[in-house]
Amino acid sequence: MPTVLITGANRGIGLEHARQYAAKGWIVHACARRPAAADDLQALLSANPDIVQVHALEVTDHAAVDALAQRLIDVPIDVLLNNAGTFGPQGAPAGMAYQSLGNMDYDIWRDILEVNLLSPFKVAVAFHDHVAASDMKLIVNMSSGLASIKHNQGSSYAYRSSKAGLNMLTRGMAAEWSDVLVIAMAPGWCKTDLGGMDAPVETADSVRDQQALFPTLTRRDSGRFIDAHGVTVPW
């Protein structure tokens, strides 16, 4: 069976990817900071004990990332979903209040950069060889439409800058790694804790479309910034 590793699998897009891949019979390595407190993830584990493994992982703890990579050293990973992310203490739209021109909380900004930018870089580097040893060889850096410089209408400066930086890392990884595919994914504005319940896209729909897209990607797609349908998002 193919194998997926998902960071931030306790809720939102990460949890939905875990659910849908488990339903397809994939081996799912689901990572979360506090898995014991992640009731939905624990329920998924209980229902699928043969194919779902849950790992405690704080992605900002680089030693812990290395330790997990070593523990899974012999596991080829077909899809690495670099999904763990944050908008800060509050999701959208409330979280815009502390990342505006008139009111920037720099401590929150630093935390957002640590989680959304530095951590996915570390995870990708640590698990590169696992992905290269698989059949699909795909790294998905979960970006956002808010990372598009062309479409930038202001606000959400901390989050936007972290995801725009992630796009830059994606392009660089694709240039240097010829043995894997690396994409930046804009999943759409989804109904999650981060996106808020006013978001227009159902999380399950976005994830279904993403999972249908992934097997169709080829070497020519590596380094692209695309949405769940494979359409290019302007840088």
Image: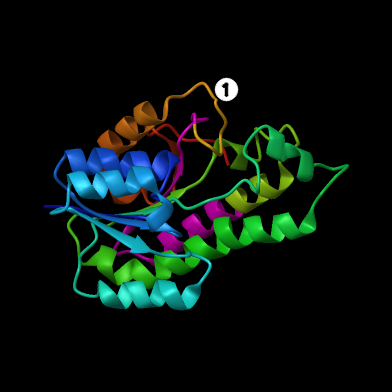
Magenta run includes residue 189:
yes
Closest to the observer: 36 or 132? Answer: 36
Report if residue 96 is visible in the image: yes
Residue 48 in percent (x, y) is at 17, 47
Closest to the observer: 231 or 165? Answer: 165
Q: Quadrant of residue 107?
A: bottom right
Residue at image coords 51%, 21%: 200
User: Is residue 161 positioned above or below 102 on the image?
Assistant: below
Residue at image coords 67%, 50%: 161
Which residue is disc 1 drawn over?
198
Left of 106 or right of it: where is 183?
A: left
Magenta span covers which residues? 165-191
In the displayed image of the protein, which residue is found farthest to the right? 102
Q: Amino acid at mark 1?
A: Asp
Q: Residues within 10 Å of mark 1 (few under 14, many from 20)?
A: few
Left of 75 or right of it: where is 55?
A: right
Q: Quadrant of residue 214?
A: top left
Q: Quadrant of residue 25?
A: top left
Mark 1, secondary structure of its residue: loop
Magenta run includes residue 179:
yes
Report if residue 216 is visible in the image: no
Residue 47 in percent (x, y) is at 19, 44
Q: What colour scheme does the image use? A: rainbow
Residue at image coords 43%, 74%: 64
Residue 136 in percent (x, y) is at 22, 53
Q: Quadrant of the C terminus?
A: top right
